[in-house]
Image: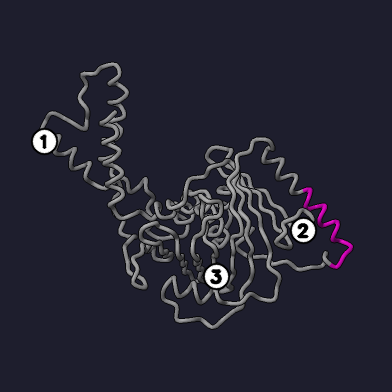
Amino acid sequence: MKTLTVFFTFLLCAQTMATPTAEGLFRNVSNKEPTGNLIVVTAMVEEMEESAPAAESTPNTASLNEALMPPTKKKPIYYKWLLSLEREGSVDMIQVSYRNSQLKEEQIVQTKYFPDIAKVVSNDNSLERSMYYSLMNMLVVNESKMFKALLVKYAQGFQSNKELMTKEKVALYRKYKEYLEKRQEDETLISPLEPTDPDQLSAVKEIMAAPMYKDAGNVELVRIDNELAWKVDLKSLNAIFSNEDHRLRKIEYQSPLGDLRVITDEYVLFNGAHELPKTMIFKDMSNKSWRVRFLGLSHLNTHSTPFTKRAQDYTDAAKKAREMRKSSAQGQEDYLNPPFIF
């Protein structure tokens, strides 16, 4: 098994030293993998006062300018998202909105249940909603699946990791896996990583030294405010990531119908292991700015209550809360309706 270790070490080193891919950056690799089958995220969303456009040029100055913008007089709305990882290959979501930060059942405004949120978003025509839920999937679950679908749909020149894989290295990897399986029955077999022919050995070394992915030419290392950062340039869509930990700092999308921009603040640990941006500024395509302030993040292991039962319990609680407010002035309240949230 020593040879297997060497092989994967070469793979890892080659990829680490190479320019990251666009898909790889949108996977949030700086965050630890989920430690439970249920993830709970809470946040406050508020609309921000409009201000004159500033001479913004960097993620840092833009973040500072927009973060200081005061909220409007409208009351903020609070959200709880429950993400279930129980079903392999899909993320199911319950979304609950509340009147205030207490997040009590009697304060529920609305609940929604999305079995396989990726499928729901892929069938939705709103870029703003696609952007927000793809970002949540990326930042919370550490997956690029939804963002990859968004890039395929809206960005120009995007190539997935599968398309960029070095075919020779993949073929060598498959040969080596096959060799390991057959070696148990025949120990005289020669490893494809150590051929006896000098020319073949030279070719193998060349393949091993090559990066795992070809350079698509849409990711480059740039200097912003005297700091190095990775820039993803897909023509209509651009993104900035920090250099060493690959944290998302900024996304911009430009179209004739309007521009969209997302800027993240500093990242903080919420449960001692997993992180989220403290604040995310979301400027929608109507040029209205929203502040999303994440309040909580929990990873839980639970099998006691089926997720569909949880969804029904929240639906019942929302119905009861609405009935309680019907006869009161509270029932006439207007609630914020961010265009990027279902």
- Contact? badges 3 and 1 (CB < 8 Å): no
Side of 227 relative to 131 (left or right): left
**Residue furthest right as drawn:** 327
Region rendered in magenta? 316-329
- Give x and y (percent) for residue 300: 60, 43
Residue 171: image quadrant is top left
Q: Secondary structure at mark 2?
A: helix
Query: Crowding near pointer 3: few (<14 within 10 Å), some, many (20+)?
Result: many
Alpha carbon separation for disc pair 3 and 1: 57 Å
In this view, 2 is above or below 22: above
Q: Which residue is mark 3?
A: 283
Residue 11: image quadrant is top left
Residue drawn at (87%, 65%), measured in percent from left and top? 328
Q: Secondary structure at mark 3?
A: strand
- Give x and y (percent) for residue 323: 85, 56
Residue drawn at (75%, 49%), measured in percent from left and top? 315
Q: Earlier in the sequence, mark 2 or mark 1?
A: 2
Q: Overall secondary structure of the magenta stretch?
A: helix
Residue drawn at (55%, 65%), measured in percent from left and top? 279
Q: Earlier in the sequence, mark 3 or mark 1?
A: 1
Question: Marks 3 and 2: which is nearer the front?
Answer: 2
- The amino acid type, in three-letter code, at marker 3 is Lys
Q: Secondary structure at mark 1?
A: helix
> How many numbered marks appear?
3
Q: Earlier in the sequence, mark 3 or mark 2?
A: 2
Question: Marks 2 and 1: which is nearer the front?
Answer: 2
**Residue furthest left as drawn:** 198
Q: Which residue is mark 2?
A: 107
Residue 199, label in figure: 1
User: Is residue 202 one of those drawn in magenta?
Assistant: no
